[in-house]
Image: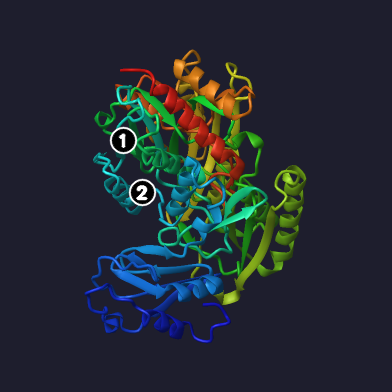
């Protein structure tokens, strides 16, 4: 599979010749596979495309197998060990599904908790989830996985019209008559990768790596947000009958990361629980009891693109890369750089340095809830003005480094000449007056913290993220994500966006805002969770916080009439929504201990 093999296709044929039939069944006809095609491979993984044949299962003491759609791979145990040593990771892909064989991720997390501890189950489920692609809006595979999980354990499940799934576990160990408790997490993950990483989030598994007590992915988001919460709920659901647990309803919502749309569409009648434990926060030792509401807005700036003037015979691409990015709620207070704001300043300087230059393109960002890490602009410039533009870019880059360099230590701004002379004859650009209008609008829009809370020290109350910019032959669109824990302040901030749209001759479309979650500081559930979390923290008093991010709790409390109280807690995750996402391994076991301790005490409260 690596360079040590002279012929990957030959090795594939060797594997497929080592098929072991089930007792009493004929050997599967290898001719049905035809010649397995090598369709992809990078690093230590290999992807094959094979035609499926019908085999229900192929398992035995001397072989291992994987079934993906209809594609089945079986090899002897000895061959599997040699394969594992050589490639460490092997993936079989069919037309309909993919699976991991000898998955590295499961082995990597196996020693993170004692085998007889519930956290070992959590880690196993998280590793399995990492093998299932789950972008927002494309959660079908992971939903099917959880349904199979429930059915294998005899647990009933219900699904609403938008795909939210509830799995129910009866009380046990003396908690049979207690009030039901809702465990909740979302199935989708933010899909971000570094530009030099070849990864398809719709087909490829997440690949774990360990660095100094932290679990990372390899050049992509990890999916601990919110895969760890989902894995914790699955670990609770499969506890044995001796576990002291109340009736548990595990709610797995879809499409959270693109605007909480799964929670918005929830049929609240599928939930009967009275207490909500949300497992989607990222700071172990803290209990969250409130969150911001938010709403997206689309700023549209219209203008035609026309052919570039003949005198502008050089195309320059100016790129900003290497910024920290991060979650536009959790990390917005840190003053991290926004690549779109930076590249707009670079573009304005380039146009000023070359009075005949024109704007061809400007793009950046790809998630409404992520601070843009990368962006680029293309300008068409007369050849004799290229040097002046490069000087202006260098000067602005130095200023950005002076302003952001202590925080954004990997920031990189580069200029690349694409082509010259006749190459620009079919390229289109905006008139300079329109380009000035576009760039001024982006630079006027608020980005970052707008106001800190007067009610809770250290809490961001209102913020705005300039999230995505796209250009077309009709103009420019700018997606903006605004958050606030006060509804009227949210709309006041969006009024400011409208003012910029008016000044720039554009239009602003506001999407409906989702509600925040109002804190209940005297909640008995909060007091219980604080006490149990403190025990897991060695007696340290937990922090009680609200978060400037969109949790689903506020929507769920509105949608589910039986819910009366809610708290949120989780292990420590840093860098969410970026390839720097990391999960602190040492916090996962005490997080799960806290969850089980809270559930055990709730099991003693009779309905």
Q: Which mark is residue 169?
A: 1
* Up-down relation of residue 540 to residue 50 (above or below): above
How many numbered markers are drawn? 2
Q: Is 301 on the left-hand or right-hand side of 57?
A: right
Seen as rendered, the residue at the extreme top is: 522
Q: Separation of disc 1 and disc 2 at Cα? A: 27 Å
| Contact (Cβ within 8 Å) of mark 1 with mark 2 | no
Camera-side residue of 542 and 426: 542
Q: Is 113 on the left-hand or right-hand side of 229?
A: right
Q: Is 500 on the left-hand or right-hand side of 131?
A: right
Q: Which is more foreground, mark 1 or mark 2?
A: 1
Q: Residue at x 30, y 82 (%)?
A: 30
Q: Is 413 on the left-hand or right-hand side of 269?
A: right
Q: Quadrant of the C terminus?
A: top left
Q: Does the rendering let one see residue 368? A: no
Q: Mark 2 — residue?
A: 137
Camera-side residue of 53 and 437: 53
Examine the image and state in which quarter residue 258 appears.
top left
Mark 2, secondary structure of its residue:
loop
């Amino acid at each position: 599979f690596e360079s040590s093999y002279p012929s990957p296709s030959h090795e594939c044929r060797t594997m497929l010749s080592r098929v072991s039939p089930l007792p009493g069944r004929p050997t599967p006809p290898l001719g049905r596979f035809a010649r397995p095609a090598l369709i992809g491979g990078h690093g230590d993984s290999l992807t094959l495309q094979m035609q499926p044949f019908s085999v229900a299962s192929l398992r035995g003491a001397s072989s291992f197998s994987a079934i993906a759609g209809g594609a089945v791979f079986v090899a002897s145990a000895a061959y599997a060990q040699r394969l594992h040593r050589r490639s460490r990771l092997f993936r079989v892909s069919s037309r309909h599904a993919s699976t991991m064989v000898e998955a590295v991720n499961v082995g990597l997390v196996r020693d993170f908790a004692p085998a007889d501890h519930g956290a070992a189950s959590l880690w196993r489920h998280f590793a399995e989830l990492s093998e299932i692609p789950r972008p927002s809006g494309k959660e079908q595979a992971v939903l099917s996985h959880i349904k199979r999980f429930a059915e294998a354990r005899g647990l009933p499940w219900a699904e609403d019209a938008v795909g939210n799934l509830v799995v129910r576990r009866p009380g046990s160990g003396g908690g049979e008559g207690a009030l039901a408790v809702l465990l909740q997490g979302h199935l989708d993950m933010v899909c971000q990768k570094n530009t030099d990483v070849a990864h398809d989030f719709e087909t490829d598994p997440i690949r774990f790596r360990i660095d100094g007590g932290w679990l990372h992915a390899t050049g992509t988001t990890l999916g601990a947000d919110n895969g760890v919460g989902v894995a914790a709920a699955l670990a609770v659901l499969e506890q044995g009958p001796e576990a002291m647990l109340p009736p548990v309803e595990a709610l797995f919502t879809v499409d959270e990361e693109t605007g909480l749309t799964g929670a918005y569409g929830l049929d609240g009648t599928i939930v009967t629980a009275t207490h909500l434990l949300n497992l989607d926060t990222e700071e172990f030792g803290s209990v969250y009891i409130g969150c911001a509401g938010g709403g997206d807005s689309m700023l549209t700036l219209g203008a035609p693109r026309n052919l570039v003037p003949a005198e502008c015979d050089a195309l320059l691409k100016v790129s900003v890369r290497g910024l920290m990015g991060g979650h536009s709620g959790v990390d917005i207070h840190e003053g991290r750089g926004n690549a779109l704001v930076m590249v707009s300043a670079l573009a304005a300087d380039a146009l000023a340095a070359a009075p005949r230059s024109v704007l061809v393109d400007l793009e950046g960002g790809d998630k409404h809830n992520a601070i843009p890490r990368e962006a680029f602009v293309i300008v068409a410039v007369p050849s004799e003005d290229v040097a002046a533009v490069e000087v202006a870019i260098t000067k602005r880059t130095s200023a950005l480094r002076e302003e952001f360099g202590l925080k954004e230590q990997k920031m990189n701004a580069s200029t690349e000449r694409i082509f010259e002379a006749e190459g620009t004859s079919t390229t289109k650009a905006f008139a300079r007056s329109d380009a000035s209008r576009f760039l001024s609008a982006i630079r006027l829009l608020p980005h970052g913290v707008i106001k800190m809370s007067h009610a809770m020290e250290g809490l961001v109350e209102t913020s705005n993220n300039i999230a995505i910019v796209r250009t077309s032959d009709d103009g420019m669109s700018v997606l903006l994500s605004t958050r606030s824990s006060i509804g009227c302040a949210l709309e006041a901030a969006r009024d400011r966006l409208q003012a910029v749209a008016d000044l720039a001759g554009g239009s602003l479309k506001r999407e409906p805002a989702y509600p925040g979650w109002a804190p209940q500081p005297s909640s008995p559930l909060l007091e219980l969770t604080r006490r149990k979390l403190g025990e897991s923290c060695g007696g340290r008093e937990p922090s009680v916080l609200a978060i400037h991010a969109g949790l689903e709790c506020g929507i769920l409390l509105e949608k589910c009439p039986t819910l009366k109280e809610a708290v949120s807690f989780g292990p420590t995750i840093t860098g969410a929504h970026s390839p720097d996402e990391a999960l602190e391994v040492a916090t996962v076991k005490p997080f799960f201990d806290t969850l089980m301790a809270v559930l055990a005490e709730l099991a003693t409260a009779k309905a």
